[in-house]
Image (cartoon, helix red, strand yellow):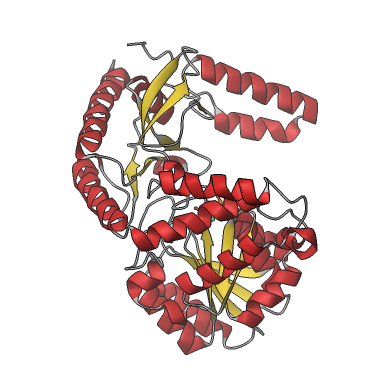
Amino acid sequence: MVTPQLKEKDLGLRDFLQLQKQQALEERATTFTAFSDEARRRGANTYARMVVSPADRKVVIQDPFSGKLRAMLMFASNNYLGLANHPYVKEKVKAAIDKFGVGLGGPPLLNGYTRLMSELEARLAALKKKPAALVFSSGYGANLGLISALVKENDRVLYDELSHASFHDGLRMAKARADSFAHNDLTQLEALLKADGKKSLNLFVGVEGVYSMDGDMAPLDKIVELCHRYGAFLWLDDAHGTGILGEHGGGTAEEHGVEESIDLSMGTFSKAFAVTGGFLAASREIIEYIRYFARPYVFSAALPPVLLAAVLAGLDVLEQEPERRTELRNISQYAAEKLRPFGLTVDPQAAIIAIRVPEWMNIRRANYLIHQRGIFLNAIEFPAVPENQQRFRISLMVNHTKEDVDLLAAVLEEVWDLERKLIKG
Ligand SMILES: Cc1ncc(COP(=O)(O)O)c(C=O)c1O
């Protein structure tokens, strides 16, 4: 086993972030590259590990530290339902290539709108129990597009403080008047709704179904009720619930039985469907409006048939193999119990488990040690989260076995012990 070279004191990302404000671009880029290379040399940079096999519970990577190929147990992928390497999905994608070729070369409003896209819109609308849907090239773009198209200067947005970066960027793009409320804090949300007192022309509320950095759910039934009471339009970003929650995989709203009360549902193809792309589902009028006013939709090329075919095939699997959702739920619950002793940030309610990293622990060194033991994990570090809230974010997939989870727990235990010793010694 390679001894960790990383010293106790981190490489000073905070210092770099301060320093860069005073540096001209060339100097800034050179300093950062040197910083990042040095971090890799010392084992402190596990980003962008190169995967050379299909995405599955086990992957083969080119190890950035040894340069050799090695098998890793994957707990960092949002391929929750194992569709990335599903034989039926692959067959459908191959057939779509033969029939439609690989791409289109243009945005949907011009030459990029295809029969597969229209078919997918109809299937997604049905999945979300809405009259219409619209497909974007990414979930990020879908959030940007939805907020910047819908919010005007006399409107106001209230949103959960833990909303995804794409939501924040959408608010910026729309130059929206916006206030956050504490995570899942309904009292604060209600106070903000009440305080607005119909001063805003349109009042929007934005929440996530399953929060991406913790894995807990929004209390959607109560949020729906508040939005109705105060006449607010409710957006739901269900990136991590779509396909895995609810009897039919309709997501967090289906799980809560409130699908028809959500004004607009957003989802991605980058999680349960394991490819890329995003979508919105709402009334026909709202969707048609967004189609012509969402800049990421209007000014970006359409998803090619190959990706649309992968999502259509994924929807078939959701219908034909509902047991995948049950199995995912079972293995996620098993993992939550097994990993609870390490300290979870919240009680996980879907397939994401966030393990709190104690303040005394060096998260980068810990992730290097975990990597050296053949486990591929995501370390969620500052500045993505505050320094005292760093965590390991574990994503379960349906193909994980109990033995995989046991191995993960054993490795964490060993690394936690080693870290304790390294800090003391
Ligand atoms: C909650 C949430 N919304 C939106 C996105 C963006 O989705 P995509 O990766 O499809 O661009 C993500 C992805 O990380 C997410 O977790």
Left or right, residue 38 beside residue 87: right
- Where residue 424 sits, quadrant-wise, is top left
Can residue 206 be seen? no
Q: Residue at x 59, y 50 (%)?
A: 96
Left or right, residue 31 beside residue 96: right
Q: Nearer the viewer, residue 111 or 273?
A: 111
In this rendering, the count of numbered labels is: 0
Q: Residue at x 48, y 73 (%)?
A: 126
Q: Nearer the viewer, residue 316 or 32?
A: 316
Left or right, residue 73 beside residue 147: left
Can residue 228 be seen? yes
Q: Residue at x 29, y 51 (%)?
A: 328
Whole-percent x, y for residue 163 in the image: 51, 59
Whole-percent x, y for residue 63 in the image: 47, 19
Whole-percent x, y for residue 348 in the image: 30, 54
Whole-percent x, y for residue 16 in the image: 62, 29
Q: Nearer the viewer, residue 80 or 190?
A: 80
| Quarter occupied by the C terminus | top left
Q: Residue at x 31, y 60 (%)?
A: 322
Left or right, residue 216 beside residue 266: left
Up-down: is 361 above or below 171? above
Up-down: is 323 above or below 234? above
- Where residue 188 sits, quadrant-wise, is bottom left
Q: Nearer the viewer, residue 210 or 9?
A: 210
| Quarter occupied by the N terminus | top left
